[in-house]
Image: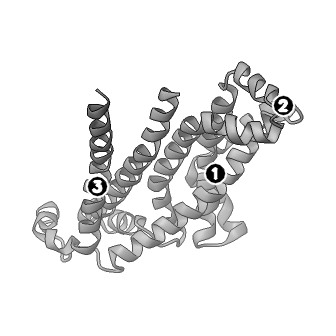
Amino acid sequence: MSNSLSIAQPRKRALLWLWPLMWGTLLLLSVVAMSAAEPLFRWIEPDARQVIYDRADFYVLLGRHLLVVGIAALVTVVVGVSAGIVVTRERGSDFLPLVGQLASLGQTFPPVAVLALAVPVLGFGTLPIIVALMLYGMLPIVRNTLAGLQEVDIDIKTAAHAMGMTPTQTLRYVELPLAAPVILAGIRTSVTINIATAALGATVGASNLGDPIISGIVNGNMAYVVQGALTIALLALTVDSLFEVLQQPLRSRLSAA
């Protein structure tokens, strides 16, 4: 029985990697060999003079897209998780409703409206879209951090305290590991949503995978729109499946515990 389980575990982990490898391969093909699909895009836009977007290489646009989403995700995770930890401590509990409302406020404003308000202050370019992504991606992270930490059984924390752990040690070695799957799910949601939302940056001069979409809309060329949307979708699927690979061992570990 134990042998069969030991064989099943590596096989299960290998299958988990199948999806990110598949989506990642398709993403790689889309950014380096988009021109090979010209007959397909010619079918979409038979009357267009040009059907392959070539104002910038797709791998360059992908890199810029990842940079914007990555910076926004890093700041949002640090701020969101830290805020969730602070307000679930005894000294910060009075601010819990305020933090929840502020995080929700970020998603009540459409990203387009945030960009319109940010551009006069921050100017055109990358910074406005980073600010918009931070505001838009904060809610899932804060909400899941609060949910994950608040769901840790009080008896477990009491036992940790009885063992001589300090509050900081209890947070580090007990609460955060138990809350990690829920927190990671919030980060996963935030990042996946922002991969699509980041395309709006092309409207304010932040060059990324939104460029073909905006150019296609302006010029009435649906082939451009499909190329940009397809690449963004493949990127989102790749990143989402990578998060699943990260989450599954955490879930299995907690189930075993």
Q: Quadrant of residue 130?
A: bottom right
Numbered disc 1: secondary structure: helix
Residue 93 is labelled as 2
Return the disc, 3 or 2, that comes first in the chain's sequence. 3
Return the disc, 2 or 1, that comes first in the chain's sequence. 1
The spot of residue 1 in percent (x, y) is 28, 26
Instruction: Count residues near mark 3 (Cα–Cα under 10 Å), then give few for <14, some for 14-19, many for 20+.
Output: many
Q: Is residue 38 visible?
A: yes
Q: Residue at x 75, y 44 (%)?
A: 83
Name the amino acid, label 1: Val
Residue 77 is labelled as 1
Q: Residue at x 37, y 58 (%)?
A: 235
In the rendered picture of this protein, how many numbered marks are placed on residues? Answer: 3
Q: Which residue is mark 3?
A: 23
Q: Is residue 84 visible?
A: no
The spot of residue 221 in percent (x, y) is 26, 65
Which residue occupies the foreground of this view, 118 or 167? 167
Q: Residue at x 32, y 37 (%)?
A: 6
Q: Residue at x 35, y 68 (%)?
A: 212
Return the disc, 3 or 1, that comes first in the chain's sequence. 3
Name the amino acid, label 2: Ser
Q: CA distance from mark 3 to mark 1?
A: 25 Å
